[in-house]
Amino acid sequence: MLFRYLTMSLAGLAALAAGGSAAFAQSCQPKVPAAELIKPGKLVMSVNPTLPPLQFVESSGALKGMRIELGTEIARRLCLEPEYIRIEFSAMIPGLQSGRWDMINTGIFFTEERAKTMQMIPYENQAISVSVERGSPLKIASRDDLAGLSIGVELGGFEESKTRLLDKELREAGKAGLTIRTFDNFALAFQALRAGQVQGVVSIDAVAKEYDGRGDFKWAISGLYPAPVSVAFKSPVLADAVSAVFKEMKADGSLKKLFDSYGLPVIAGDYAVKGPNR
């Protein structure tokens, strides 16, 4: 359900992912004033854990993935305890603005329009992919081959906006457009693909690659509409503190090590905050 808030302390996960960050947070002075946080001493982050290998729930129920490890390490270096709220993407920006969490940590795509309303730090590059059922008879080698297909996508995100842009571009080129079906999250979109309710799903390259590697779905097209991915904040003070952590992790090599472990490139950017009055 869209507004089903499931809060989960990551004390146990933190110990696995970042060497006991909760314990570390208790033994040092938080680097962010309590007034800038939803809960003093904690970094509350929203995540939509339906994007393996970047963010997902393993069979034990624990949150896993690159962005979970990254968020936990950011909290550790700020001497804060990480806490996650699992929520659909469409609720994340309103939730940030209304003070439900400190940080969006779900790979929110950076756009100039979004940066007018919140503090954003681009830190990762991604692009759009299309997955189809393994064994599908569809011959898809380019975006033109998507004309006339039924496509599933998560509601409210960059992926949906680019899918609608692709539909517009196809129609303007005189081709059949897309039938676009939106879902509360990517897990539901891929379930619909498996059930034959859609012919393809738009996600991001890393997710489509993961499903292809597992043998679940065929990675048909990749590299569409490349753009930077960000973390996002309401508090400029917190955003500046996290920016400093990114720069520190880049300098000491830990960011590259984390990205390398997931086969992702480290961006050449400076991890500066982009937002209102910046």
Image (cartoon, rainbow, N blue to C red):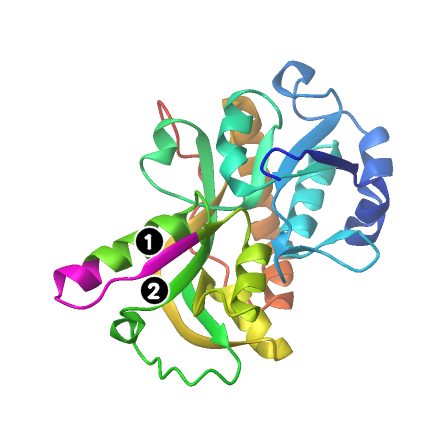
Q: Secondary structure at mark 1?
A: helix
Left or right, residue 96 beside residue 33: left
Image quarter where the N terminus lies is top right
Residue 262, visible in the rendered structure: yes
What type is the residue that disc 2 sits on?
Leu
Residue 224 badge: 2
Nearer the observer, 5 or 111: 5
Residue 127, visible in the rendered structure: no
Residue depicted at 39% across the width and 26% down the height: 117
Residue 162 badge: 1
Count of numbered marks: 2
Q: Is residue 218 magenta?
A: no
What type is the residue that disc 1 sits on?
Lys
Identify the magenta region: 169-181
Nearer the observer, 250 or 117: 117
Q: Secondary structure at mark 2?
A: strand
In 3D space, how far apart are the residues under numbered discs 1 and 2 (Cα atoms)?
9 Å
Relative to 196, residue 234 above or below:
above
Left or right, residue 146 beside residue 219: left
Residue depicted at 58% across the width and 63% down the height: 191
Image quarter where the C terminus lies is top left
- Mark 1–mark 2 contact, CB under 8 Å? yes
Q: Is residue 170 magenta?
A: yes
Relative to 270, residue 237 above or below:
above
Residue depicted at 59% across the width and 61% down the height: 259
